[in-house]
Image (tube, rainbow, N blue to C red):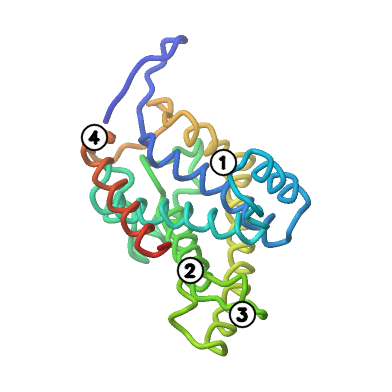
């Protein structure tokens, strides 16, 4: 596990590599943008006019044009995150944090211990949240790609593969999955507040800096250093980019 010493002399350990943190915060931004474009807020009209004035687009993209592009960016991130969950750093790998019911029960018991000390990486409960969010995001993007608009103009990039009725069914599922995403985001925020206010464990700062004070973490086992090798990242970026390009074109 990579460690260093802060200005206060306190040893800190790296628990999240930069790709995990980048994925987390860019996903937050893209979900907000996709919600805003779906609701066709005025900001996208302003940006549309900017694109026209800059000569980037003759007629602009429209809110749904932005929506689709943000969706492809999010798809890129999700493909990379799934790849990184298999081949990435120690705390990013699914095999390292997805646990069975027994481990979840044992972890819940530790929440009564004071002072509470989080483990390295995702907790068993946090893993459930990660998996649920990934599944719903995948569902959201998949249904969006096959969605057929009522007038058939603003449809998903793979809508030509299904008939109108099937495309409208995907549109309904797309809306339902977004409602599910709302619920999961709300639960996620409540969990962060619970850890901060009740357990006195800050989950936000480590997702920004990637580090925690060493004495505030329970280390039950020795883990490999948290690293994001350039070659491994590059392979994931190329793989994700090719898959998005094949879908978009």
**Relative image position of residue 68 (x, y in whole percent):** 55, 60
Callouts 1 and 2 close, C-beta under 8 Å: no
Callouts 3 and 1 close, C-beta under 8 Å: no
Separation of residues labelled 2 and 4 (CA atoms): 33 Å
Question: Mark 3 against mark 1, which lies toward the viewer?
Answer: 3
Q: Earlier in the sequence, mark 2 or mark 3?
A: 2
* Quarter of the image that includes the N terminus: top left
Q: How crowded is mark 1: few (under 14 residues within 10 Å), some or many (20 or more)?
A: some
Total tally of numbered discs in the picture: 4
Q: Name the residue beneath numbered marker 1.
A: 199
Q: In the figure, 18 relative to 112: above or below?
A: above
Q: Residue furthest right?
A: 42
**Does residue 177 appear left or right of residue 96 in this picture?**
right
Q: In the figure, 223 relative to 167: above or below?
A: above
Please tell me which residue is depicted at 27% across the width and 55% down the height of the picture.
95
Q: Residues within 10 Å of mark 3 (few under 14, many from 20)?
A: some
Question: Mark 4 against mark 1, which lies toward the viewer?
Answer: 4
Q: Name the residue beneath numbered marker 4.
A: 229
**Relative image position of residue 171 (x, y in whole percent):** 59, 77
Callouts 2 and 4 close, C-beta under 8 Å: no
Q: Name the residue beneath numbered marker 3.
A: 172
Q: Quadrant of residue 185?
A: bottom right
Question: Mark 4 against mark 3, which lies toward the viewer?
Answer: 3
Separation of residues labelled 4 and 1 (CA atoms): 34 Å
Q: Name the residue beneath numbered marker 2.
A: 157
SS under mark 4: loop
SS under mark 3: helix
């Amino acid at each position: 596990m990579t460690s260093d010493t802060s200005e206060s002399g306190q040893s800190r350990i790296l628990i999240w590599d930069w790709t995990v943190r980048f994925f987390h915060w860019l996903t937050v931004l893209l979900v907000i943008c996709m919600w805003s474009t779906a609701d066709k807020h005025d900001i996208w009209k302003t940006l549309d006019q900017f694109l026209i004035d800059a000569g980037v687009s003759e007629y602009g993209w429209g809110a749904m044009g932005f929506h689709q592009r943000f969706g492809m960016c999010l798809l890129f991130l999700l493909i990379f995150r799934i790849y990184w969950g298999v081949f990435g750093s120690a705390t990013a790998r699914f095999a390292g944090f997805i646990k069975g019911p027994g481990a979840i029960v044992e972890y819940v018991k530790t929440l009564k211990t004071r002072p509470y000390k989080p483990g390295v990486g995702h907790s068993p409960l946090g893993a459930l949240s990660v998996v649920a969010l990934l599944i719903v995001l995948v569902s959201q993007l998949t249904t969006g790609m096959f969605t057929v608009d009522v007038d058939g103009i603003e449809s998903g990039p793979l809508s030509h593969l299904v008939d109108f009725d099937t495309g409208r069914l995907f549109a309904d599922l797309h809306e339902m999955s977004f409602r599910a995403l709302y619920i999961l985001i709300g639960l996620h925020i409540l969990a962060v507040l619970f850890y901060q206010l009740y357990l006195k464990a800050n989950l936000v700062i480590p997702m920004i800096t990637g580090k925690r004070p060493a004495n505030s973490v329970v280390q039950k086992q020795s883990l490999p250093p948290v690293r994001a090798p350039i070659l491994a990242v590059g392979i994931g970026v190329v793989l994700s980019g090719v898959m998005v390009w094949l879908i978009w074109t």
